[in-house]
Amino acid sequence: MDIESGVLNKDLPVIQDADLDGKIVLVRLDHNVVKKGAVKDPFRIDQTFGTLYYIAERGGLPILMTHVGRPKDKKTGKISCSPDDAVGPIVEYLKRKLHADLYMPKFDVTENGLAGIGDSIKPALDDLRKRKIGGIYLPNTRWFQGEEGKGIERESFAKQLAGLADVYVNDAFGSWQPHATTYDITVHLPSYAGFLMQQEIENLNRVIYPERPFVAVVAGAKYDTKIGPLYAIYNKVDYLILGGVIYNTYLCAKYGISIQGVSDSDIQAAKELVDIDRGKQKIVELPYIVESDTLEGKIEGRYRTISTSDFREGNKYNYILDIDPRSFEDKRVEDVMLNAKTIFVNAVMGYTPHFPLGSKALDETIDKNASALKMYGGGDTLQEFKNLCPGLYLSVLDNSKYYFFTGGGTVLTAIEQGSPFGLKPVQALIENKERLGER
């Protein structure tokens, strides 16, 4: 097996090869679905059930962990342990769905998050070994100082985690950053990829090695944060459709116009893409867009549809907040979408929740192409799909022509690198297997 064949790399250690019977299994998940103290969308949790069932069926004793939100202040470095990003709602959801008795240990909170794993967890570990409880769910990993820390602080945290378990399983595809719980831990325990991780990697290969014509739809709130992945996708696709501020920036750079909210520096950066596309003609323009005088909502009389055919150098526009659905009836746009064999979407086309019609029209147009493989990446992208087209979403959940990734940022990073095996947490699993093979 190899990457080019669209299946797993033979060097990736998988959970099927692990001896789990009677072993405490430390499982890193991406259950980052809590918003303001409630589970916003359980999709990412549900996608990990296969791994959790397998561990239980094989006699494993699970300790689960995930990050939630960004509790660390980037400016001060301080970590706050707010109920808004606690794992409690996740645990309650798992208890209801799996009828599992999960224990949540409590550790002493300092002025800067949690210092580490204390001895208070020992009674719970004894109960787990005796099967008095079904599992343990650790606090938000980003509450711990060592998770994103450096040096001894981080090394100590990884060793403390390893001291809890016999085996490590990474099923957190969406957590591609090399943190203590996704990367460093693999130095200390036999480590394996869970079923969701395997599934996501296999489907990533279908984006990296697509059946053509390959169409990508990419949007974003800032141009400068997507430059690397955007160029990587551009080089891979046959056609590229843009949305959001990324599209606004492209239009400014191409037509010499100005749009409220688009910076001059981003426009300058986008000119390179415009120059490249003059020769390759990969970018498919959406000709009808929605201009609004305000960001405060969709206020009658303060928004209108405009056409890119009316652009003239020097023109100034207010906020462009959506794609008019008529854009998807344009002959070139429709032909590109309906003739594609692979479609990848990482895009919310409008300024939600006030301007949803562009995203709804995009999803409905894509569904008209019954033969194409349609792949969606990103939590916001999937959430908008579910909100705007609930009937369609439910009808395609088990459709082999649809696939929903649990981590959009991970997909873009892997595309930029040209391989899912370049992701640091995946590399760490492979390196762990190599080390164990040398013993």
Image (cartoon, rainbow, N blue to C red):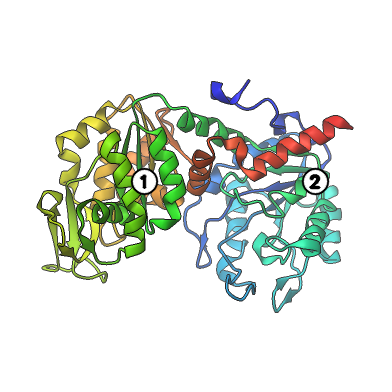
As shown in the figure, which amino acid type bears the numbered disc 1?
Val
For the question of whether residue 19 can be seen, the reply is no
Say which of 342 and 232 sits in front: 232
Say which of 349 and 246 sits in front: 246
Q: Is residue 135 above or below residue 333?
A: below
Residue identified by numbered label 1 = 218
Say which of 282 and 427 sits in front: 282
Say which of 287 and 228 sits in front: 228
What mark, if any, has residue 187 been given in the picture? 2
> Is label 1 in a helix, a strand or a loop?
strand
The crowd level at tag 2 (other Cα within 10 Å; few <14, some 14-19, many 20+) is some
Q: Position of residue 426 (x, y in %)?
A: 65, 40
Distance from Cα at disc 2 to Cα at disc 1: 36 Å
Q: Position of residue 406 (x, y in %)?
A: 51, 45
The crowd level at tag 1 (other Cα within 10 Å; few <14, some 14-19, many 20+) is many
As shown in the figure, which amino acid type bears the numbered disc 2?
Val
> Is label 2 in a helix, a strand or a loop?
helix
Image-quadrant location for residue 229: top left
